[in-house]
Image (cartoon, helix red, strand yellow):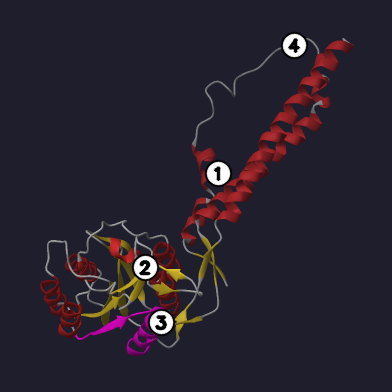
Amino acid sequence: MLTVAWPWMFALIPLPFLLRALMSPAAGAADAGLMVPSLRRFEVLNERSEARQLLNWRFWLVLLAWTLLVTASARPERIGDELEVPVTGRNLMLAVDLSGSMDAKDFELGNRSVDRLTATKAVASDFISRREGDRIGLILFGENAYLQVPLTLDRDTVNVLLMESAIGLAGEKTAIGDAITLAVKRLHDAGDDAEEQVLILLTDGANTAGSVPPLRAAELAQQVGLRIYTIGIGAESMVISSVFGGTRRTNPSADLDEETLTQIANSTGGRYFRAKDTAGLQDIYRILDEMEPVAKPEAGFRPVKSLYYWPLGGAFVVAALLVIISLLAGIRLQRMHRVRIDAS
């Protein structure tokens, strides 16, 4: 269905005629005259009739260009068919650790060893793509916490900016408390109209930086109704080569503070998960899908596409034609004048 957002703009179409009627003619133009003994010298005027007719078209082209400009100003739109759009009323914030320890290559993806952040990106990206109807935001944290994406329904943008994140971008240390506090602030600033507010926090270490202790931040989250799911990432055993040619087994997740992450989740009504490999991380996100289900489609949304650029483009084309016609008419009159002089 075609419609216009501002139909009252069409009232401006008669404006050029009104201005012409109200404006007084140039002083002395009506009294101008020239006395000549003979009209023989003015026979060239008849020869100029074709050029004069060409110029008369300018009036209609100017009127057409003005009408197209007014039409573009009225904002023509095409309203599509009613669509089913799922809306959950849930604000979901992801907080991803970018500290230096996320560089440990103790995960596998596609039969190759990858670092923890690469595995997180792959699994979290699929999770984001499934969250149709949720308003999703992204926080990246290390030594400092940053809001990378504010709450939005644009899941593609969240995915792109997650994939562009890099280890060490926010510092080498881990500020878990600051990340939670930032999520609380952003969710609170978003308003209280959301039915549910959820934070999924993924880290591989303990709080080693920041100004707010994690448990104090969890208290603030609990006060505003923010439910936190924490994920501790990292393998429990890893074989590494020594400088002397041998191998030794080590625990790459020795610094993971599972006790604090569990307390954060329990105090806010959430849950703590342990991801020791890529498969385990995928299972966690599937469980989160079940615990925080997406909405069923609801009718009531009609897509609107703006069409103003069509009449606006037409106005520019007509303006270009006016310039060309004016040039052609001027050239034609000059040629007629030269022919008359040569004949004399």
Q: Residues within 10 Å of mark 3 (few under 14, many from 20)?
A: some
Indicate which disc, 3 or 2, sits on the residue closer to the N terminus: 2
State the CA–CA distance, disc 2 to disc 4: 117 Å
Would you place residue 13 above or below residue 297 in this image?
A: above
Q: Is residue 309 above or below residue 279?
A: above
Callout in the foreground (1, 2): 2
Three-letter residue code for mark 2:
Gly
Please state, as top left, top right, bottom left or bottom right, where the C terminus lies in the image: top right
Q: What segment carries the magenta color?
A: 269-292
**Which residue corresponds to mark 1?**
17
Residue kind at label 3, given as amino acid type: Gln
* Disc 3 from disc 2: Cα separation: 33 Å
Q: Position of residue 166 (x, y in %)?
A: 37, 59
Q: Which residue carries the number 2 mark?
A: 246
Q: Earlier in the sequence, mark 2 or mark 4?
A: 4
Q: Residue 36 bears which disc, if any?
A: 4
Q: Amino acid at mark 4?
A: Val
Report the mark closest to the observer, 3 or 2: 2
The image quadrant of residue 276 is: bottom left
Mark 1–mark 2 Cα distance, whole angstroms, equals: 94 Å
